[in-house]
Image: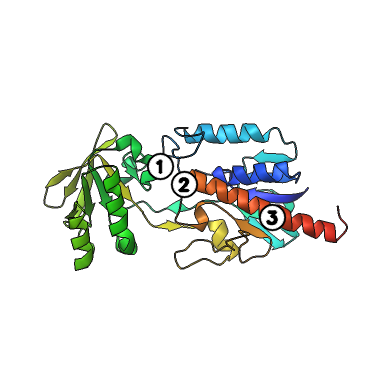
Amino acid sequence: MVYDAVIVGGGPAGLAAALTLGRARKRVLVCDSGPRRNAAAERIHNFVTRDGTPPDEFRRLGREQLLAYPNVEVRDLRVDAITGEKGAFRVVLGAEAVEAKRVILCTGMVDELLPIDGFRELWGHSIFQCPYCHGWEVQDRAWGVLASAEHAGMLMPFALQLRGWTRDVAVFTGGLFEFSADVQAGLLTGGVRVETAPISRLVGRDGRLASVEFSDGRQVPRDVLFAHPPQRQVALIQALGIALDEQGFVRTDPMTRETSVPGIYAAGDLTSRMQAAIVGAAGGMQAAAMLNLELTMSMASSGAL
């Protein structure tokens, strides 16, 4: 079987790409396998017409709408390898393989959860990455930020913006690094408290965060934490040898979304720190539209249409 495009990943980016290519009358295969990044999240927010939708329901609706396009196929299969070149990619799916003229990667990222006692259990329930996705539901409560040296440069604007949702914001360094005097002064002036003691654990109660406990036994009550743990690409991306930027995200052309490998496009969380369902869907649509334009022009110029 030869597909016009194989889409790797069936989250918001992959579903949007499939819908765009399906409506453009291209033959598409969506391969969706493995745990989704937002598996711990209870709702998708800040997505117009889908605000508050559970992630599983969002995917169900996306797949259901693709049924209207018989040229789009969705399969629960893992892509083990991609070889070949533009116009003739070989996509290995376990014991079988298919051919694809183009590929769109929508694989997301792998979060390396912080090695703090209680972090894993609270991730997605009381520990979030994005206040635009989860801030409204916990407004006016006690919030915290787990700071890291990697993102120290963005810490002050991130922490200060949280004051738009609540007046009670604290930054926790865990004793792992120190702020510059300017950053510390800016946080304090903006009404953000700073806690520098080493953290021993996160105390939960009934599946929700209750407090942050330090190594000396002291506890600071908190209802919500925001954190940006390290992320890495999935094995498939690493094996393809696609160029990454200095932060480890797949480098794409800002207009076409094509990667450093001709004929392979990328959209969604694997391409940017700006990670949200609606952003991923927009990127998937853009990548698919640019792929369709380039592929259709190529077919027309060769007389294949």
The secondary element bearing badge 2 is classed as: loop
What amino acid type should be assigned to the residue bearing mark 3?
A: Leu
The spot of residue 95 in percent (x, y) is 68, 48
Give the class, few, some or many, for how many residues have Cα within 10 Å of label 1's Cα (few <14, many ≥20). some
What amino acid type should be assigned to the residue bearing mark 1?
A: Cys
The spot of residue 279 in percent (x, y) is 51, 48
Locate residue 102 relative to residue 143 in the image: left or right: right
Give the residue number, with chain letter if any, for mark 2: 276
**In contact (CB < 8 Å): disc 3 and disc 2:** no
Give the residue number, with chain letter if any, for mark 3: 291
Residue 133: which numbered mark, if any? 1
**In contact (CB < 8 Å): disc 2 and disc 1:** yes
Label whose residue precedes the other's in the sequence (1 or 3) = 1
Label whose residue precedes the other's in the sequence (2 or 1) = 1
The spot of residue 223 in percent (x, y) is 24, 39
Label whose residue precedes the other's in the sequence (3 or 2) = 2
The secondary element bearing badge 3 is classed as: helix
Locate residue 219 relative to residue 90 in the image: left or right: left
The spot of residue 178 in percent (x, y) is 21, 65
Q: Quadrant of residue 90?
A: bottom right
Q: Is 3 above or below relative to 246? A: above
Q: Residue at x 61, y 52 (%)?
A: 286
Q: Quadrant of residue 173?
A: bottom left
Locate residue 53 relative to residue 27 in the image: left or right: left
The secondary element bearing badge 1 is classed as: helix
The one nearer the camera, 166 or 304, is 166
Residue 63 visible to an observer of this rendering: yes
Residue 93 visible to an observer of this rendering: no
**Marks 1/3: CA distance?**
29 Å
Question: By what rule are the colours in the image chosen?
Answer: rainbow
